Amino acid sequence: MRKLFSLMLLMGLTCQAYADNTAPMTLHGTLIEPPPCSINGGQDTLVDFGTVGTSRVNGENYKQVIGYTIVCEEDPDNHPWLLGLSVTGTSTSFDTAAVQAQVDGSSSRDLGIRMLLGGKAFVLNKRVDISQGPQPILQAVPVQAPGATLPEGDFHATATLLADYE
């Protein structure tokens, strides 16, 4: 019993020594949201490739510039928000920067629309930092699976352009 009391007394003294080396700490801050942005005023963007020759789809022919504008409200406190851009959608099995396209009346999965940002492949579902100044050039171009023969018919593809802050 005496050993137990001595052990308890020793533990109490040890805890008291640590208690003298503590100080209360208060943490606080303010949560803020970045200013809202919109792309093309919330309107859909249509890229019309016109009539495309099935044997001329090579990743260069029929390239189109995608007109878009990103407008962000001003931040009155001038915080250093980092703006990013991404294209979300289903990529083809042969090109991670190409949105899967469907040819009407066909089950072919051999046609895609490659996205380019600043002239380079813009991998789908991957965010890229951009400046809040002039926006980089965004382009789209039809591509096909290697060795594929494309069927005739109208084609379409859909994706979403997303601007966000990090």
Image: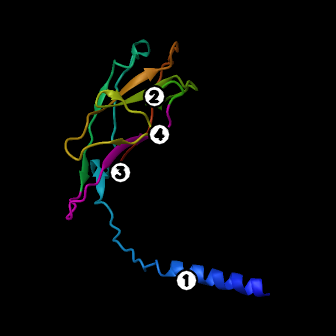
Q: Report the residue marked by disc 1.
A: 16
Magenta-drawn stretch, dominant element (helix, strand or loop): loop
Q: Report the residue marked by disc 4.
A: 89
Whole-percent x, y for residue 149 in the image = 51, 14
**2 or 3: tag closer to the N-terminus:** 2
**4 or 3: tag closer to the N-terminus:** 4
Q: Nearer the viewer, mark 4 or mark 3?
A: 3
**4 or 2: tag closer to the N-terminus:** 4
Whole-percent x, y for residue 70 in the image = 26, 48
**3 or 1: tag closer to the N-terminus:** 1
**4 or 1: tag closer to the N-terminus:** 1
Q: CA distance from mark 2 to mark 3?
A: 30 Å
**Quadrant (top left, top right, bottom left, bottom right) of the N terminus:** bottom right
Is 19 positioned to the left or the right of 70 in the image? right
Q: Report the residue marked by disc 2.
A: 155
Residues drawn in magenta: 73-91
Q: CA distance from mark 2 to mark 1?
A: 77 Å
Q: Nearer the viewer, mark 4 or mark 2?
A: 4
